[in-house]
Image (spheres, rainbow, N blue to C red):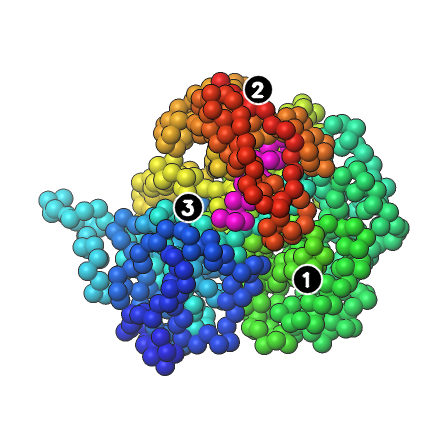
Amino acid sequence: MHPEALPRTDDLRPVTEWSSLSRGLWRATLGQMADEVRYTDLAAEPPRWATLAALPEVPFPFADGDVRVGLTPDHKVVIRLPLGPDEKVYGLGLQLDGLLRSGQVLTLNMDHWGTGGGRTHAPVPFYVSSRAYGVFLNTARFTKVYCGVGNRLGSPANPEPVDRNPPADEPQPGPWLALPPGDAVEAQVNAAGLEVVVIGGVTMLDVVCRYNLYCGGGALPPLWGLGFWHRVHAEFDADQTTREVAEFAARGFPLDVIGLEPGWMSKSYPCTYEWQRKRFADPAALASDLLAQGVRLNLWVNPYLSPASRIHAEMTPWAGSHLVWLGLVPDYTLGTPRRLLAEHFRREHVDLGVSGYKIDEVDGYDCWLWPDHATFPSGTPGETMRQTYGMLLQRLLYQDLFRAADRRTYGNVRASNGAASAYPFVIYSDAYDHREYLTGLSAASLCGVLWTPEARSAGSDREWLNRMQTVCFSPLAMLNAWASGEKPWSYASVADAVREVIELRMRLLPYLYSAFAAYCFHGVPPIRAMILEDAASGGACRRAGRLDGQANPYGLGSLVEATDQFMFGPSVLVAPFYGSQATARQVRLPAGVWYDFYSGTRVGSAETIQVDANDLGNRIPLFVRGGALVPMLAAPVANTRAACGADLEIRVYGGREGAFDLYEDDGSTFAYQQGAFRYRHLRVVDGVLSESVSAGAGPALFGAAVARVMG
């Protein structure tokens, strides 16, 4: 629609100029986008057009003229997309208060963690409908979204008004509703233009996969990134770090990555990105010694540059108008500051053997970051820079540093946004509620980001075990002891159980690595919400509210969602113990027949079951879909270096046959992007394993396999 043709919001006009991008993808550009940043401009990889073109064709989900657009009096774009009477809306970023957005208003504003309202570490403007389509508002601006909230004058879908306080003898057409349902999703963008991408699908999971494929596919970490991580106390020096690694080995706890916190740096808050030589006299020797043990080194950074840094003077002309912690805020939309920082990191870190980074403090709060009216050399608006700064740092490290060196990386970041699925960074948070952490795992799968419920400390042995079990079934298994100094064995009564779950994580590496390959090539989230698996097991319901003149004067109800369990890879359901359900809980099993992971015993189908920690030997509840194969290492390993070439145990659940495509590449370089990978097609019939290898140039990664029929 031509910008001059955009009407006022009291006269929204239909969007008619949809262009077909691929099967199930349509795009419309509304208003003036010439000076706007699209999230897809910052994607790590180009869309996977060939994969999208091979998917089933689906119809455009809206009738002609149903999507409408206009301008507010102050020239902001408003779009309206219709909702059916029973249609539900899910997603809109990494929200820790649930997945269902129907009946809510969210302001999608990059910020430090919060529950509700839309301000979060990843305010991704993408929602998925229960009717199996999605909408991506592809503009890096603050966006306010009304999800079925508000009733327009003249809408034929408005419910009939009901008298809230009628005489007893007067009939009413229905209950009085404090929030009468609206018939649309309406969104307002703080700009004069908006790009909208509509994504159709066969199922909700199919919609999410197509979104991820459009954004470049999913991240494929190096194999070592999927091992166990430990971040040491902020003030550790080289000797303490070395002793910490040695104690992991002495106690028999697996370890792949050791993370250094701010004390490794000569100055931090703001940062120099240069070594504190009083603590780390020879960082190259430290990195080399660790790598000889199969342990990688990861460094904490935040992106605000100290006057003490050797690149401060060169970077000053490329910085924004405001400081953060009195450090420069470089404009990394531009090539020169990207080059300056990448070269600095290469000289100071990567050439010495550093394998990755934890990017902190790119989210908020308002009082810590630059104001929305801040200016930057590129002309990028302050709010756009805020929405994208975490992505800009990811792009710099991924493309300019590690891919340029043909070395895969994996790390942490505190903020991400739309079109970020191919970046090998996992979001973390200062939140620490275990129930919210579980919700975060599900919410992340709806918006193309990864999330870790990192463990830090606990109030009891049981809580520690439960948190460690949850993190071992997340995209990044990490203990973050930067403040607490905790170790996996700090809670003595559960130390063996903690070691057991970390070892199980390591044994599941072949299964998990293959799940990430499916994310990379086909867009399937490796950890995903139950609503993407089966609506009945992952759906939401509302409990009626009780009228209270002070606490609940409108009788509002509450939302109940099944976000305390999730899928791990293609076939494993994880239902952690947590909080008030620390030792016993209910689990909703999706359709199909499900089996206990440990024993292979049949547990149920499309029903709710009760599980108890004592019955499971204090292990995390895990269930496997009938007919699934789960490839595992035959024995525990100390780190992923020992996993390469290790023999496999192929578990068969729910009978004596099944199939699995085991992905293999070199585990560390980008050669897979040129086709240097292979699949081992594993098949078990009558308990006997056979396998074939797909044609390709890929290397073997794991060793010989033996089938084990469970149950």
- Nearer the observer: mark 3 or 2; the answer is 3
Which element is circle 3 on?
helix
Residue that mark 1 sits on? 400
Contact? badges 1 and 3 (CB < 8 Å): no
Q: Position of residue 178 (x, y in %)?
A: 29, 51
Q: Rate crowding at label 2 as few (under 14), some (14 to 19) or many (20 or more) other CA atoms within 10 Å.
A: few
Q: Which stretch is magenta?
A: 506-522
Amino acid at pointer 3: Leu
- The quadrant of the rendering that contains the N terminus is bottom left
Residue drawn 83% across the image and 45% down it: 288
Task: Place residue 631 in its image quadrant.
Answer: top right
Amino acid at pointer 2: Gly
User: Is 633 situated above or below 169?
Assistant: above
Residue that mark 3 sits on? 205
Residue 604 left/right relative to 415: left
Which element is circle 1 on?
helix
